[in-house]
Amino acid sequence: MNQAAINLIVFAALVAIIWLVSKLILSRNILHSKEQKHKTLTEDILKQLFHVQQSNRIATISNLSGALKIRKAKILPMVVQMTKAGLIETVDDTILLTEEGKAYGLKIIRIHRLWEKYLAEKTGYKAAEWHYLAEKMEHQLNEKEILELSDTLGNPLFDPHGDPIPTQEGDIAPVEWIPLPTYPLNMPGKIAHIEDEPGVIYQQILAKRILVGSHIKVISSNKNEIIISSEGQKHIFSPIVAANISIVPLSKNEAYEERAERLSSLQENQWAEVLGISKECRGANRRRLLDLGILQGTKIKVDLASPLRDPIAYRVRNTSIALRNSLADLILIKKLNADENT
C-alpha cells in the first residue's frame, strides 16, 4: 500500500472520530437541555402552586396552563410525573402540594427573592427588570451558591418589593398587610409591599415613583378611584392598580412628616432641610449621596436648574452637586420658611 493510500485512510479515520465525538457532544447537550427544561417547568409549577395555595385558591390543570402560559397537553404529563415523584397530589380536579413539594417550591421562591434583592442592591438594573432576570436565575443556582448569595446580602428577611424571603429551613416571616383600597382614610401608614405581577400594572406604579417604605395617607376611596398623598404629591389609582399596593400602619417609633416632599420639587430661591434618603436608594448611589454630605438635617437649595430641570444642581455644604430627578426623588426634604432658614 502506497503512502497516499495510507494518508487517505488515516484522514478518513480522523474524520470519522471527529464526527462521532461531535455526535456524542451534541447528544449530551440535547439531553442536558431537555433535562434543564424539565427541571425549569417542574420548578415553575411548584412555585405557582405554592402561590395559589397561599392565597387560598384552587389549582387545576386549566388555571395552571393559563397562569404559566403553557398548553394543557404539556402540563398533564408533568402533573403525572410530579405525582409519581411525590411532589404533588390530586384530589378530583384539584392539584395540591405535598410537604416535599412545598419545601421544594419554597426553595425556588427563596432563590428568586434573594436574586431580586441582589439585583436591587448590587447592580444597576431597573426595578422593572428584576423579576424577569430573577426568573431566569432561580433555576440555575445550587445549594452552595444559594448560601453564598444569602451571606453576601447579609441574610435579608425581605426582598425589594417587600415580600418575605424564606429561610434556608423554609421558615417565612408572617406579614399583616392591608390592601390600599381598604386602608382607613387619613390614617398615616407606609407602603410595605408592591406586587410586581402583572407587569403592566407594576409599570404604572413605578411610573408614579411609588416606593416601598414611602409614608402615605389615603385621602379618598370609592369604587372608581383611590387618591393618596405621599411625599408632597397626590396620586390617583384605579382600584385594580391600588390592590397591588399593601400598607401597614406606622409603628410607635415612626412619625408621619406632614411636610415631607421630594427634593426634585424644590424651586429656585427655596431652602430645605434633608429629612432622609429613601431605602430605595441603594448601592453606589446611596454611598455617593452620603459622601456628598446629604444627611438628615443638612440644609440644601437649588443652585442651578437646566432648561428642562433635569438635572438640577443643588447647593449642599458650600458645594454644588448635579442630580437627576430620578435620584432627587429619593431624597426627602422639608421646605423651610424664611424664619426657619437661619
Image: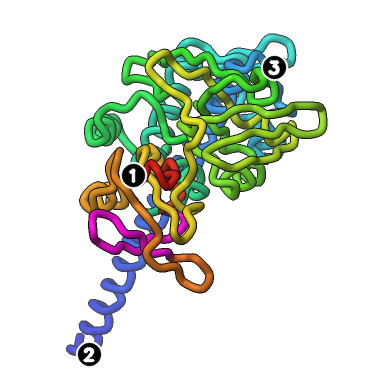
Front residue of 338/69: it is 338
Q: To which residue does mark 2 refer?
A: 4
Furthest residue to the left? 3
Of labels 2 and 3, earlier in sequence is 2
Q: To which residue does mark 1 refer?
A: 282
Query: How far apart, in angstroms, are the residues tagged by discs 1 and 2?
Result: 70 Å
Q: Which residues are magenta?
A: 312-327
Q: SS at mark 3?
A: loop
Inspect the image, locate mark 3, and give the three-letter code of the amino acid beneath it: Ile
Q: Is residue 308 visible?
A: yes
Q: Would you call the spot at circle 1 few (<14 residues within 10 Å), some (14-19), or many (20 or more)?
A: some
- Quarter placement of the N terminus: bottom left
Q: To which residue does mark 3 refer?
A: 58
Does residue 313 show up magenta in the picture? yes
Instruction: Give the label, 1 or 2, closer to the camera.
Output: 1
- Quarter placement of the C terminus: top left
Inspect the image, locate mark 2, and give the three-letter code of the amino acid beneath it: Ala
Furthest residue to the front? 339
Image point (34%, 41%), residue name: 118
